[in-house]
Amino acid sequence: MARRFLHAAGHDLRNALLATVFFGAAAGIFGATLNNYLAEAHGFDAAARGWLEVPRELPGFLIMFITGALLTVASESQMASLAMLLTGVGAAGLGFLSPTTAAVVVFVAIWSLGDHVIFAVEGPIALRLPLGVPAGRSDRVRRVLRLPADPRAPGNGATGGSHGGGSGLTGSSGDGRAPGEAVGPVRLGM
């Protein structure tokens, strides 16, 4: 039954489910062993571990700016791939390339950046995949930044935006007006 569901759900959903399972297992193992590793391999006591929380949580504090910048150049799926790569590089570097405390801090920050970016994009990806909507940059971000419409998104043909009426920035408005043409006078009051 599960096999039929995965086959019917499509290639992208199957890959997302597999990535979630394997990445979740790796993150669980990493999180469960991090404190012991830092204490035994690097001699971190409670105070040093507390100070390590500053660079570990800095990407989480800045995540709004980081994901905003990434959304202007990458789709959510691309961001998830980058996040998994960063998390893997951070974990591998922490285990194999960190003989000094400075290296530990750098690799923990890299791991944490990937971890926080994946938290930011897993929800939008999970909402898009079962519906078959192609992964792309957010239409709202595109309109605010006045970026051209994504030609891969549904509804971005001659009619403009993907919500029927268009944004007035590209294509026609959907009601016979030319792009950017005013609707007419606006009346306020009764």
Image (cartoon, helix red, strand yellow):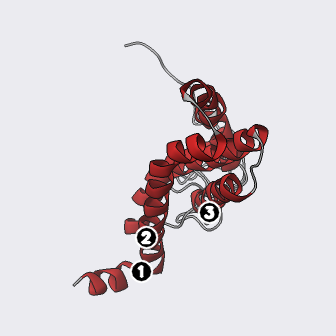
The residue singled out by tag 1 in the image is: 10
Q: Quadrant of residue 64?
A: top right
Decide: is 19 above or below 183: below
The residue singled out by tag 3 in the image is: 81
Residue reaching furthest to the top: 189
User: Is residue 124 visible to us here?
Assistant: no
Cα distance in 3D space between marks 2 and 1: 8 Å
**Which mark is first along the chain, 3 or 1?**
1
The amino acid type of the residue labelled 1 equals: Gly
Q: Quadrant of residue 128?
A: bottom left
Contact check, label 1 and label 3, Cβ < 8 Å? no
The amino acid type of the residue labelled 3 equals: Ser
Q: State left or right for residue 122 relative to residue 136.
A: left
Q: Position of residue 63 (x, y in %)?
A: 61, 37
Cα distance in 3D space between marks 3 and 2: 19 Å
> Which quarter shows the N terminus?
bottom left
Q: State left or right for residue 3 relative to residue 119.
A: left
Contact check, label 2 and label 1, Cβ < 8 Å? yes
Please report the residue visible at 38 percent of the width from the left and 66 percent of the height from the top.
131
Considering depth in this image, is 176 or 65 the residue closer to the camera? Answer: 65
Cα distance in 3D space between marks 1 and 3: 19 Å
The residue singled out by tag 2 in the image is: 132
SS label for mark 2 = loop
- Alpha-carbon neighbours of circle 1 within 10 Å: few (<14), some, or many (≥20)? few
Front position among marks 3 and 2: 3
